């Protein structure tokens, strides 16, 4: 196996474990890394198979947290967010990342709350019921936005600068010999 392939595999598995773990440990509702990870995966990784990175992180954590009836809507949201990342991958800057993060949050909110309205009997199956479902989901929307923006920046800039830091640490250690 090529050294770069092993490095990429270890990095990918590490990212999946970190993202899955942060859904499992106590955190504010909807403040999770998966939206940011989906966007990052769409921007950073070359292969289309990278769309499975956020889905695997979800699946690993869902194996522990439990499955639910709105999973199709949640997973579909993250696939769409991955493709938003693909759309901006060649022109990323901080304003594009923030915009993509906000659009991702809105899409996740709209799609997943639509799933709740469609699959559960909590709301009337009419426009008023759908509106009420979205209104009841508003308290969670703030954390979705904050989590998506925080983790988008953390993944994007953390990944970018981690190699610079690792290289500098290597140079310092080499100079000590």
Image (spheres, rainbow, N blue to C red):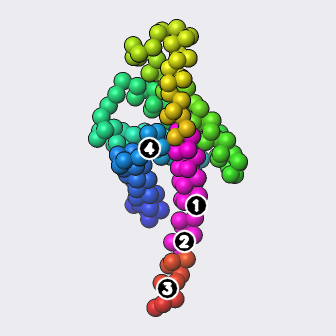
Identify the residue at image location x=48%, y=46%.
33
Name the residue beneath numbered marker 3: 174
- Which contiguous range is marked in magenta? 144-167
Look at the numbered disc 2 and give the secondary structure of its residue.
helix
Name the residue beneath numbered marker 1: 160
| Structural distance between the alpha carbons of marks 4 and 3 | 42 Å
Q: Nearer the viewer, mark 3 or mark 1?
A: 1
Q: Nearer the viewer, mark 4 or mark 1?
A: 4
Asked whether the residues under the numbered discs 4 and 3 touch, taking CB atoms below 8 Å apart as contact, a structural biologist would say no
Callout 3 crowding tier (Cα within 10 Å): few <14, some 14–19, many ≥20: few
Look at the numbered disc 3 and give the secondary structure of its residue.
helix
Q: Earlier in the sequence, mark 2 or mark 1?
A: 1
| Structural distance between the alpha carbons of marks 2 and 3 | 14 Å
Give whichever of 165, 133 is nearer the camera: 133
Q: Earlier in the sequence, mark 4 or mark 3?
A: 4
Callout 4 crowding tier (Cα within 10 Å): few <14, some 14–19, many ≥20: few
Q: Earlier in the sequence, mark 4 or mark 1?
A: 4
Q: Earlier in the sequence, mark 4 or mark 2?
A: 4
Look at the numbered disc 4 and give the secondary structure of its residue.
loop
| Structural distance between the alpha carbons of marks 3 and 1 | 22 Å
Name the residue beneath numbered marker 2: 165
Give whichever of 176, 132 is nearer the camera: 132
Q: Earlier in the sequence, mark 3 or mark 1?
A: 1
What mark, if any, has residue 28 been given in the picture? 4
Q: Position of residue 62 (x, y in %)?
A: 33, 38
């Amino acid at each position: 196996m090529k050294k770069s392939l092993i490095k990429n595999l270890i990095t990918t598995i590490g990212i999946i474990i970190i993202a899955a773990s942060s859904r499992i440990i106590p955190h504010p509702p909807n403040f999770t890394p998966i939206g940011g990870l989906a966007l990052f995966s769409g921007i950073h990784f070359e292969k289309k198979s990278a769309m499975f990175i956020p889905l695997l992180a979800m699946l690993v954590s869902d194996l522990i947290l439990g499955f639910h009836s709105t999973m199709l809507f949640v997973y579909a949201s993250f696939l769409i967010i991955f493709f938003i990342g693909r759309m901006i991958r060649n022109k990323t800057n901080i304003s594009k990342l923030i915009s993509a993060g906000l659009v991702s949050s809105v899409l996740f909110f709209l799609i997943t709350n639509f799933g709740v309205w469609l699959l559960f009997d909590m709301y009337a199956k009419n426009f008023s019921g759908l509106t009420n479902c979205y209104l009841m989901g508003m308290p969670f929307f703030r954390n979705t936005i904050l989590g998506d923006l925080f983790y988008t920046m953390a993944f994007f800039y953390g990944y970018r600068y981690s190699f610079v830091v690792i290289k500098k640490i290597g140079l310092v250690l080499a100079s000590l010999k």
